[in-house]
Every structure is written in structure tokens, then in C-alpha cells.
Image (cartoon, rainbow, N blue to C red):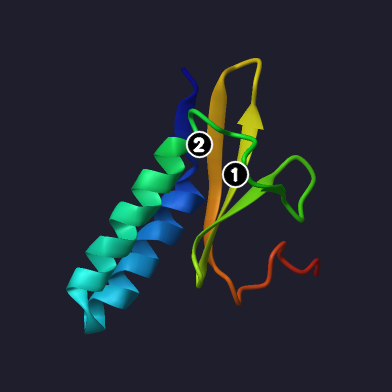
């Protein structure tokens, strides 16, 4: 079975999103967190289900109308790496400076 790995930036994104939503609606924050967990865990069985991402080597999964999970699949290592969890309105990939 494919293993799910979370990069530190993705964990930080997820925590920041939950903190922001929980300020107004703790139940909604928990619901969204559970949805993200459920959908990212499902990638272990179907890592190529979602469209190729805007950055080479990534895929993007819309987990909620406002949130997108960016991930990479490594079929040899049997891993899916969660790269970022972003608000749909965020600039992605980041603008080059």
C-alpha cells in the first residue's frame, strides 16, 4: 500500500487553516480537517485520480471548494507526499521574485 507523507509546509498550512476557521466556527474547522484527512488518506489507493498540477511533477486535489491539496506521487517508493494545502485563491505556484 502507498504511504502518505506530509511535508512540514503542508502541515503548517493545514494548522493555519484550521486555526483561522476555528476562530469563528470550531465545528466547521474540525469538519474540514476530517475531510482533508479522509481525502488525503484515500490517495494511498488512487494517487493518480486527480489532475496534474501547475508545478511539474505534482497533482492537485480540490478537497473543498475553497481548498486545494498539492501532492506528488512516487510509484517506485510507493509514497504520496502532501506538498501544500492552499486556499483556492492563493497564488500557486508562488511568483518568482
Categorize mark 1 by other alpha carbons within 10 Å: few (<14), some (14-19), many (20+): many
Of residues 94 and 30, the one drawn nearer to the viewer in this rendering: 30
Q: What is the secondary structure assignment of the residue under circle 1?
A: strand
Task: Tell me if label 1 and label 2 are in contact, CB under 8 Å.
Answer: yes
Q: Mark 2 highlights which residue?
A: 43
Residue drawn 27% across the image and 68% down it: 29
Whole-percent x and y of residue 50?
A: 64, 46
Looking at the rendered image, the quarter that the C terminus falls into is bottom right
First in sequence: mark 1 or mark 2? 2
Residue drawn 54% across the image and 64% down it: 86
- Left or right, 40 with respect to 35, comes to right
Categorize mark 2 by other alpha carbons within 10 Å: few (<14), some (14-19), many (20+): many
Whole-percent x and y of residue 78?
A: 56, 19
Of residues 25 and 11, the one drawn nearer to the viewer in this rendering: 25
Residue drawn 44% across the image and 37% down it: 42
Q: Residue 33: name its quadrant.
A: bottom left
- Left or right, 43 with respect to 59, comes to left
Q: CA distance from mark 1 to mark 2?
A: 9 Å
Whole-percent x and y of residue 57?
A: 75, 40
Q: Residue 25: name its quadrant.
A: bottom left
Q: What is the secondary structure assignment of the residue under circle 2?
A: loop
Label of residue 71 in the image? 1
Residue drawn 68% across the image and 72% down it: 91
Whole-percent x and y of residue 40?
A: 45, 43
Amino acid at each position: 500500500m502507498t504511504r502518505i507523507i506530509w511535508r512540514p509546509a503542508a502541515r503548517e498550512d493545514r494548522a493555519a487553516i484550521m486555526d483561522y476557521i476555528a476562530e469563528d466556527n470550531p465545528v466547521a474547522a474540525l469538519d474540514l480537517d476530517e475531510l482533508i484527512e479522509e481525502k488525503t488518506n484515500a490517495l494511498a489507493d488512487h494517487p493518480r485520480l486527480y489532475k496534474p498540477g501547475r508545478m511539474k511533477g505534482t497533482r492537485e486535489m480540490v478537497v473543498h471548494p475553497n481548498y486545494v491539496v498539492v501532492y506528488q506521487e512516487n510509484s517506485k517508493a510507493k509514497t504520496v507526499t502532501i506538498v501544500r494545502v492552499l486556499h483556492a485563491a492563493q497564488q500557486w505556484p508562488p511568483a518568482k521574485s
